[in-house]
Amino acid sequence: MTSLAVENDPYILAPPNPNSPVVLSLWISPGNTHPNAQYRDPVWPLAPLIDSPSTELATIYWQGCPDPLLAQVKQTTWTMINGRLRPTYLLTRGSHSRARTSAADIRDTCNEWMRLARWLHARRLSSLTDCTDDMWRAYIAQRWGDGVSRDHAARVCGKLTDLWAFDQLSARPAGVTRPPWDVEGIDDFLPAANSPARGENSTEPLDPAVLGPLLVWAIRFVDDFADDILAAWAERSRLIAAAEANPAIPEGQAVLAEFLLPNVRSGRGLPSARMHGRRGLARSYISAVTGASVKQIDHFVARNQLSGLANEHPGPCPLEVPVSGQINGNPWRERMDFDEAASLMRHLGTAAVVVCLYLTGMRPQEVQGLRTGCCPDPEPGAQGSASRHLIRSQHYKNVVDDDGNHISAGEAREVPWVAITPVVHAIRVLERMVPDGELLLSASHHDFAFQRGRHGALKGSGLNKRIEDFVAWVNYEAQAQGLSGQVIPEDPHGAIGMSRFRRSLAWHIARRPGGLVALAIQYGHMRTVLDARVSSGYGSRSRSGMHSVLDVETALAAADTAARLRERIAAGEKVSGPAARRALTDAATTPRFEGRIVPKTFAKKAAAFLARDGVVLFDNPDAMLICAFKRETALCDPEPGATAPRQYACQSGCGNTVRTDSHARQLRERADEIDQLAAYSPGPLGKRLRHNADKLRTIADTHDATARPAEAAA
C-alpha cells in the first residue's frame, strides 16, 4: 500500500504488471507505428520512442540480466522509460541533464545497469540493495580496469547514478543506495586524463588530396551522370515489371535458342547479373527482351546446361537508353547496363550526400532528415536574400520540450540553410529518386538491390559504408578511364565518415581560401554568407552551430599563422608592408595551439579571439601574404562585423598587408611558372601572362627594397 504523499506525487510511477506496455501511450507520438511490447516480454523494442529518421532502432534484451536481479533492474528500467527525473534533481546536474533522454541512451543506460547486476551476481549478491557504499567503490575501480577514457568514465558514473535516481521514482523502490561519487564529487573516482575528448572539433578534417577528387567525382555524378543513371534505373524497373508479367508463350523456347545459343557457340558472353558474389544469367532481362517467361528460361537453362556459363563468360545487358554524360569530352559509357543500374543508383545517392554534407556544413542527422520540397526554387523576381535557394530542415541535437524531455523528432530550424548551386542540383537529383513527401534518403527507396522496406532514412553506419564503396568505384573507374590523376587516395586519418565533412568545410574555408581543393568560388561564397551571421544567413540560429565550428578552425589557422611568422623572424627573415608592426606584435603575443583536439568550451574562446579586430593574422597562400585583418582598412569589402577577411577577394595596396622574405621568394617562383606557361600560349594570352609575372616580380622587388628586420620594424 502506498502512502498518500506518494499517490499525489506526479513523479512517482505505480509499479507495472506483466501485461503493462513497455512504453506508455503518452510517450508515443501519433505518427509512430512501431510495435510496442509487454512488460513480461524478454525483448523490449524502444522503437515507439524513436521518431528521428536517422536513428537506429534500439532494443533491450533481458537475457543479459541474471535472474535474481532481473525483476529489480526491469522495474527501474521501465520507470526510466516512462518516468521523468525531478526538476530539483536536474538543477544540480548541469545544463545538459534531461528529464527524459533518447531511446539509445535508455538502452545504453540499461545495459550499464545489467553489467553491474552481473558483477553483483558473480559475488553471490541477489539484490541491488546489496550494492553498498563499499561495493560501489569496488565496482567502479574494477570497471575502469579494461581501460576507458575519463569522459566515458564520467558518463558511466552518471548512468549508475540514474539507477539510484529512477529507483526513487517507483512506488515500490528496490532500495538502491546512492553512489558515493554523487556525494563526494566525481573527480576522485575517475581514471587519469590520458585520452582525448571526443566531439565535433576533435574530428580530423579530410585531407585536401582526398577531398578534392572526391568532390569532383561527386559533382560529376550529380551534374553529368544523373540523367543517364536515372534513365537506366527506370528502364531496368520497366524490364523487371515486364518480365514478372510475361506469360509462357508457345514460341518461348525457340526465341530463347535464337537469343542465347549463338553466344554459347561463339564463346561470347551471356547476359549476366551479379548474384551472391557470382554472376548468373540475367533472367529478368532476358525475359523482358525475348518475351519468354522466367519459368521457360529456367527450363531452357537446365536443358542446355547453361547455369555455369554466365559466370565463366559473363556478358553485358545493354539498355536502350541514351548516354549523355561525358568525362573529358568523351561518353562515360558506351551503353548503360541492366546489371549496373542498381549500383550506380546507390553511388548517385552517395554522391548527392557528399555534396550536401560538404557544401552546406549540415550535421549528418540534418541531411538524413531532409524531405522532398525542402529546397524550393525562389519566387520569380525575388531580390536579395529571398532570391537564394533556402533549405528548410529539422535539427535534432539537444532538442527538448519545455519540461526538459528529449524530443526524438527534433524541431524545424528557425533559420534555413542557404543552398549553393551544387547543393541545389544534389537535392533535385535526390528528389527524383524518391516519391513526393518522402525522406530524400529514405532507407526503403535507396535499397535498390533488395527493396526491403526499411525504417526511416539511411543510417550513419550504412552511409559511411556507401561512401567507402563510392571511393572504391571511383578509383576503379578513374584507372579504367585513364584518369590516374583523379584517383582518391587513402586518407591519412582513416576512413571517410559523414562526421568529417562538417569539420572539413570549416578547415578548407579557413585554410584554403583560394581554393586548392575544388570549387574555390564556393568557399568564397560560403565565407561571405557565414560572416554575415544574419537571419537570412548560413546555417544557424545564433553564433553556435556551423558558425562556432568555423570560428574554431579560423582561430586555429590564425594561431598557426602567428607561429609561422615567429619562426620566420627567428630564422632571420625580414618583413614589409603597412601592417608589419601590428603583425609582429600579434605574433609575439598569440599562443601556439599544440595538437588538434579542442574541447567544446574552445568555441567561445575562438569567437572572442577573432573579435580582436586589427590583431589577428590570416595566411593567404594564393596572394602570398599575411593579412593583419582590420575591418576599417580592409579593401576586400568585408561584411559589417566580419571577424575575418574575404581572402579570395584580396586587393593589392591594402593597409593590412604583411610579407616576409619567404613570400617574396614564392612570388618569384610563381612568376617563373607563369613565364613557362606564357611560352606555350597564343600571342595575346601569352602577353597577359607575362604582364602578370612582371607584376609579381615587382611586388617581390618592393618587398626587398622596404623590408626590415623585426627589431627595426617593431
Image (cartoon, grey):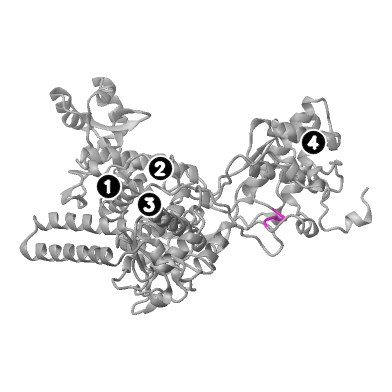
Residue located 65% across and 56% down the image? 406
The amino acid beneath tag 3 is Ala
Q: Earlier in the sequence, mark 4 or mark 2?
A: 4
Q: Earlier in the sequence, mark 1 or mark 3?
A: 1
Residue located 42% across and 44% down the image? 496
Q: In front of the other: label 3 or label 4? A: 3
| Chain part drawn in magenta | 96-100
The answer to the question of whether label 4 and label 2 lie on touching residues, with beta carbons closer than 8 A, is no
Q: Earlier in the sequence, mark 2 or mark 3?
A: 2
CA gap, disc 4 and disc 1 = 64 Å
Residue 509, position as x, y percentages in the image: 39, 59
CA gap, disc 3 and disc 4 = 56 Å
Relative vertical location of residue 530 with respect to residue 344 in this rendering, above or below: below
Q: In front of the other: label 4 or label 2? A: 4
The answer to the question of whether label 1 and label 2 lie on touching residues, with beta carbons closer than 8 A, is no
Tell me the crowding category of disc 4: few under 14, some 14 to 19, or many 20 or more residues within 10 angstroms, Cα based. some
Q: In front of the other: label 1 or label 2? A: 2
| Tag 2 secondary structure | helix
CA gap, disc 1 and disc 3 = 62 Å
Residue located 63% across and 49% down the image? 48
Residue under numbered circle 2: 466
CA gap, disc 4 and disc 2 = 45 Å
| Relative horizontal placement of residue 594, taking residue 284 as reference (left or right) | right
Residue under numbered circle 3: 571
CA gap, disc 2 and disc 3 = 48 Å
Q: Earlier in the sequence, mark 3 or mark 4?
A: 4
Residue 21, position as x, y percentages in the image: 72, 46
Residue under numbered circle 4: 137
Q: Earlier in the sequence, mark 1 or mark 2?
A: 1
Which dot marks residue 593? none
